[in-house]
Image (cartoon, coloured by chain):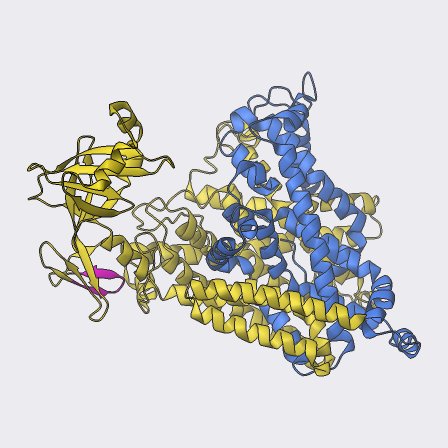
Chain colours: A blue, B yellow
């Protein structure tokens, strides 16, 4: 047990220690830093050449927008799958299951070319734009989420909506005013899972985004540290701590829900 | 009220559809245009017919899924049978236009001295004089021969003539000028003192689909994405063309491509298996320890052990890259202090693989621990009591009760974990970037590359040029394997039957 605790925690402690070490290098680091200071953290927020704080902000903004849109779209789709009976319903459910089999990143080349041609039509959604990147994330997010959400909707009894509809509510009003408030827990879980996934996404962000001020943290951090461990270790460590913190807090907060989601088959990206 | 909103919404969507349609028509993308038309018709039906009501809710999700998942997959299949890549980036029309705009200096041309003028609107006018004193006025791509006393010449006198310094300054503008002389020749700037006649080098004939070199008379025929002369010489650049199963044939038949591909393939399988095995064994071991009610501080241990899983993987991988650093990394520091020697973690093929497995163990064991804990807690305690009564040892209990029952719920998750690691790009790419490279490979392949990172490098970062066609062919191989694994998994867990039941 002790062995594994050390294995699990040592790298984390080592990085936290490095982030307070003003020497900013791997050379001669010790676990308890001498002359501990916040100089590395200051660098994260002030560096002109490597705007790390801006990258963290980009990642958070992209994550929030993507997650919000995903929740809206999947809840609409899940409502239809859960409450309506229509032709192609079975096929639709099956398709959403099938699509998640093929990781979207495998089609990275095609998606790159697709976004390239969308960019010719709408320059603000092309290559090297956040909108284009969000577009890609929206496409990849449907499969699992629609399933999880439909499963939850199925557990909400029909009777509430029926009585609302007798009072003259339209199906959309029933969705908006009854189902959504009742389904708040699953909406929150999907939102946060999506946020964590988007925040950590690396492939499309690095393929599609090419200018420094638009990087997400995943892309920027990788380029920042690339083989510069001797000269940038401290600042990198500070950036890692700051970048990981929001996700770790969310994770701890949501542990209970996540565990149930994990056992039903979701794999973290 | 609702009707007005609906009508307005539909109108906006249709306007967008028409706008995209016009663009597609102008770009001559007829296939995509047809698909768009189909989509537009469906959308309108869904909103006009009452029967379409449920589909309205599905529309946004379906739209993005088709555009960004289904269409790219289909397009990948298409690219895999083309030669798309460096040297064959442009389509045929663009390549023909490029060849037709090539001009060579007409050997017999003597050169024209010139004067340049700007009119009041800053437009450029040229006066050319050949060696025999004949003059032409050039403006806006057209040439007009002039005699002495022509009113045009008088007009030029009214403009500002550019002096030597102005000419030098306007070099770029001047060299962009070309004037049609006759059907085959253009007048272009040769140097700062003279213009000359240039001859169009190639002419394309639509009817016969041939490109002719006007000087040598060689006829080029389009074959497999290149214009090719009868003697086999190819003109570059080539164009995008369907070349059938060539990419797959290269993958299996070209030793310099096949060798690395096979070794990447084998490592991918090893990697996925080892990843699942190591994380599962450690995760299960810890879960059993944490499941023991006699253990103190279980909750604290659990929260601490989960930490590696909570940190975004891209950050962890970069941190470990620092820890594994051969000269300065803390792991080698400790090894030097204890064992006395250090390990070339990221330079040696074997140790790079070990480093990857260690990193992935760190990243993945908490996940296995969580799911095993869940599964253990659901095993009925009475079973163990019964076993105890029968005199079973604790190993026998584990072997005959815990493991089989655990596998029922955890087994399918192990399979999906296998296919997840099979395509676990970020860990590989961020820790080793697939390095060290395989010596003698014609494609950018490394000892620690798995199929997905190999594809990525083929498509996006090869020093020898990108090869979308080959990358897509490898992608299809991955599709097939991942698809087969998942299908097997679905059969195993009955997910497909679930779909049937839930409908």
Q: Residue at x 72, y 55 (%)?
A: A68
Q: Residue at x 30, y 32 (%)?
A: B159
Residue A78 shown left or right of residue B331 in the figure: right
Residue B362 shown left or right of residue A160 in the figure: left
Q: Position of residue A159 (x, y in %)?
A: 90, 77
Q: Main secondary structure of the magenta part?
A: strand
User: Does the rendering let one see residue B501?
Assistant: yes
Q: Position of residue A1 (x, y in %)?
A: 72, 43
Q: Position of residue B240 (x, y in %)?
A: 33, 61
Q: Position of residue A228 (x, y in %)?
A: 51, 29
Residue B258 shown left or right of residue B144 in the figure: right
Nearer the observer, B281 or B323: B323
Magenta-colored stretch includes residue A144:
no
Nearer the observer, B244 or B28: B28
Q: Residue at x 27, y 53 (%)?
A: B98
Give the extent of the magenta segment.
B220-228
Q: Residue furthest top?
A: A35
Query: In the picture, residue B4 is in which quadrant?
Result: bottom right
User: Does the rendering let one see residue A100?
Assistant: no
Nearer the observer, B270 or A234: A234
């Amino acid at each position: 047990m002790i062995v594994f605790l050390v294995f699990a925690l040592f790298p984390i402690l080592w990085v936290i220690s490095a982030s307070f070490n003003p020497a900013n290098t791997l050379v001669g680091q010790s676990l308890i830093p001498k002359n501990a200071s916040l100089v590395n953290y200051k660098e994260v927020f002030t560096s002109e050449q490597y705007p790390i704080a801006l990258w963290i902000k980009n990642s958070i903004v992209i994550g929030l927008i993507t997650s919000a849109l995903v929740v809206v779209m999947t809840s609409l789709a899940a409502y239809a799958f859960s409450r309506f009976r229509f032709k192609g319903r079975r096929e639709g459910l099956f398709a959403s299951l099938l699509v998640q089999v093929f990781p979207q990143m495998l089609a990275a080349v095609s998606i790159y070319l697709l976004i390239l041609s969308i960019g010719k039509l709408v320059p603000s959604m092309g290559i090297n734009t956040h909108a284009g990147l969000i577009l890609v994330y929206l496409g990849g997010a449907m499969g699992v989420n629609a399933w999880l959400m439909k499963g939850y909707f199925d557990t909400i009894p029909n009777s509430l909506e029926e009585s609302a509809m007798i009072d003259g509510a339209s199906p959309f009003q029933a969705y908006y005013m009854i189902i959504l408030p009742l389904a708040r827990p699953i909406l929150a879980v999907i939102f946060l899972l999506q946020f964590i996934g988007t925040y950590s996404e690396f492939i499309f962000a690095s393929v599609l985004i090419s200018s420094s001020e638009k990087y997400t943290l995943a892309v920027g951090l990788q380029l920042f540290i690339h083989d510069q461990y001797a000269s940038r270790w401290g600042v990198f460590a500070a950036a890692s701590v700051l970048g990981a913190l929001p996700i770790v807090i969310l994770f701890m907060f949501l542990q209970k829900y996540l565990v149930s989601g994990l056992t039903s088959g979701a794999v973290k990206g | 009220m609702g009707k007005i909103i609906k009508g307005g919404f539909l109108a906006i969507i249709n306007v967008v559809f028409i706008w995209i349609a016009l663009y597609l028509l102008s770009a001559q993308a007829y296939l995509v245009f047809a698909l768009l038309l189909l989509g537009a018709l469906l959308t309108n039906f869904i909103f006009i017919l009452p029967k379409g009501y449920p589909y309205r809710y599905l529309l946004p999700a379906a739209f993005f899924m088709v555009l960004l998942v289904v269409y790219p997959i289909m397009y990948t299949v298409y690219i895999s049978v083309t030669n798309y890549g460096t040297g064959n980036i442009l389509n045929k029309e663009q390549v023909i236009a490029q060849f037709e705009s090539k001009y060579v200096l007409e050997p017999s041309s003597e050169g024209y001295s010139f004067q340049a003028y700007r009119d009041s609107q800053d437009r450029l006018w040229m006066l050319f004089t050949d060696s025999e004193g004949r003059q032409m006025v050039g403006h806006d791509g057209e040439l007009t021969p002039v005699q002495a006393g022509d009113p045009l010449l008088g007009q030029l006198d009214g403009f500002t003539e550019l002096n030597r310094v102005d000419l030098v300054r306007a070099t770029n503008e001047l060299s962009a000028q070309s004037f049609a002389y006759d059907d085959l020749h253009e007048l272009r700037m040769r140097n700062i003192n003279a213009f000359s006649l240039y001859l169009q080098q190639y002419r394309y004939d639509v009817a016969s689909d041939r490109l002719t070199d006007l000087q040598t008379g060689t006829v080029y025929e389009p074959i497999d994405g290149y214009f090719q002369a009868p003697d086999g010489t190819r003109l570059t650049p080539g164009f995008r063309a369907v070349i059938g199963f060539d990419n797959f044939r290269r993958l299996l038949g070209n030793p310099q491509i096949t060798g690395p591909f096979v070794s990447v393939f084998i490592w991918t399988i090893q990697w996925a298996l080892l990843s699942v095995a190591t994380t599962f064994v450690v995760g299960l071991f810890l879960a059993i320890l944490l499941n023991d009610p006699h253990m103190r501080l279980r909750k604290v241990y659990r929260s601490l052990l989960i930490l590696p899983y909570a940190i975004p993987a891209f950050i962890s991988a970069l941190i470990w890259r620092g820890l594994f650093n051969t000269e300065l990394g803390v792991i080698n520091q400790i090894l030097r202090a204890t064992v006395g020697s250090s390990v070339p973690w990221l330079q040696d093929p074997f140790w790079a693989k070990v480093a990857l497995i260690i990193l992935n163990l760190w990243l993945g064991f908490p996940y296995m621990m969580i799911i095993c804990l869940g599964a253990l807690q659901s095993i009925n305690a009475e079973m163990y009591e019964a076993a105890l009564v029968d005199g079973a040892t604790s190993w026998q209990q584990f072997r005959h009760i815990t493991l089989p029952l655990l596998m029922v719920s955890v087994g399918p998750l192990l399979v999906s974990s296998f296919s997840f690691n099979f395509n676990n790009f970020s860990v590989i790419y961020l820790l080793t970037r697939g390095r060290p490279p395989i010596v003698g490979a014609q494609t950018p392949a490394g000892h620690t590359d798995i199929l997905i990172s190999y594809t990525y490098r083929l498509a996006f970062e090869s020093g020898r040029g990108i090869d979308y066609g080959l990358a897509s062919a490898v992608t299809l191989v991955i599709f097939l394997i991942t698809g087969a694994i998942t299908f097997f998994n679905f059969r195993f867990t009955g997910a497909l039957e679930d779909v049937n039941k839930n409908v």
